[in-house]
Amino acid sequence: MINKKVFIVAEVGINHNGDMSLARDSIFAAAEAGADSVKFQNYKTEDFVTDLNLSFEYQSQGKTVKESQYNMFKRCELNREQLIYLKEQCDLAGVMFQSTPTSVEGIADLQSIGCQILKNGSDYLTNLRLIRAMGETGLKTILSTGMSTLSEIDNAVRAFRETGNENLMLLHCTSSYPTPAEDVNLARISTLREAFSVEVGFSDHTNGTTAAVGATILGAQWVEKHFTLSKDLPGPDHWFSMDALELRELVSSVRVAEKMLGASAVGPTPSESLGRRDFRLSCVAARDIPKGESIMPSDITFQRPGDGIAPVHEGMLVGLKLTRGIKKGQKFEKRHFDG
């Protein structure tokens, strides 16, 4: 399951275009780029659209395309046999297989092939019947919160927890493709964590890696990004999805951000140890002081390196009588005051 490092998901979604060879190649490319998981969608088109007159306009291969929503989604449906195949390919590639179902039957298909995590899309956050069915499986479930009010998220969380399942994560998400910087609102990651006492991740629809890195620093435990083998492939999502080189950059950037985040305890790091000795200050004589004189505050100044008596302890030297002389700039040591 998910470990302490940020879990990175390559969202192929419908970018396989109904072609299992393209889907397989996408899995291996995402794995090679460093993704932890590859996600698809196992919907039935009739679960959410039946009106052939409902159209969708999108960018594809540099052109504006308008087509029936039903036809667009229908050609990218995945049946159970295809899900089994994709799960096998993910296992071979060493990444976790995931998919987003839109029905109880879809959930059952995922359970039957050994899926470890369920994902509910932002468009289905208000489908409390499906969310309860996810909760009843006992599996870890990810609820994406794009387009939602806090009240709608609360209803979804309550519905899930009513099943007795507490294995829940919320994804902060802005359902805008690509998301402009002013609409990313990464501060909501903390809001969701505090409001619902859950793990929180980030479904990233921005261009580039900046938002994913920011989410990591703010404590996101999951980063999801749309993925394609080529932005030039036909279809509605390819043009704004990350390709393999961009995904590799995102993975690298997130892993560096994790290292930079580090530990919350305050103290010198291992890499600072040498500098702490070389660049900190020690108490030294401000002038040549002969044997037998008592140390005055004006007799003490501070110089590098910091391997002597620290400035914070200068008060302990004041009033002590020298048993041997000390030269200007020489560090005060215990031997200067021994009998």
Image (cartoon, rainbow, N blue to C red):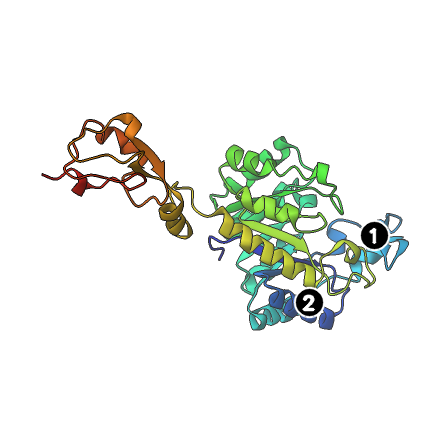
The residue indicated by pointer 2 is 26
Q: Return the mark for residue 69.
A: 1
Residue 322 is drawn in which quadrant? top left
Residue 184 is drawn in which quadrant? top right
Badge 2, how many Cα within 10 Å: few under 14, some, many 20+? many
Quarter of the picture holding the C terminus: top left
Q: Nearer the viewer, mark 2 or mark 1?
A: 2
Residue type pointed to by label 2:
Ser
Of the image marks 2 and 1, the number of the one nearer the N terminus:
2
The x, y position of residue 281, in whole percent, is 36, 40
The x, y position of residue 132, in whole percent, is 57, 44
The residue most toward the left is 339
Q: In this view, does 183 lie above or below 57?
A: above
Q: Is residue 238 above or below residue 190?
A: below
What's the CA distance linking mark 2 and mark 1? Answer: 24 Å
- Tell me the SS state at disc 2: helix
Q: Is residue 45 in view?
A: yes
Residue type pointed to by label 1:
Gln
Badge 1, how many Cα within 10 Å: few under 14, some, many 20+? some
Q: Is residue 40 in view?
A: no
Q: Nearer the viewer, residue 225 or 306?
A: 306
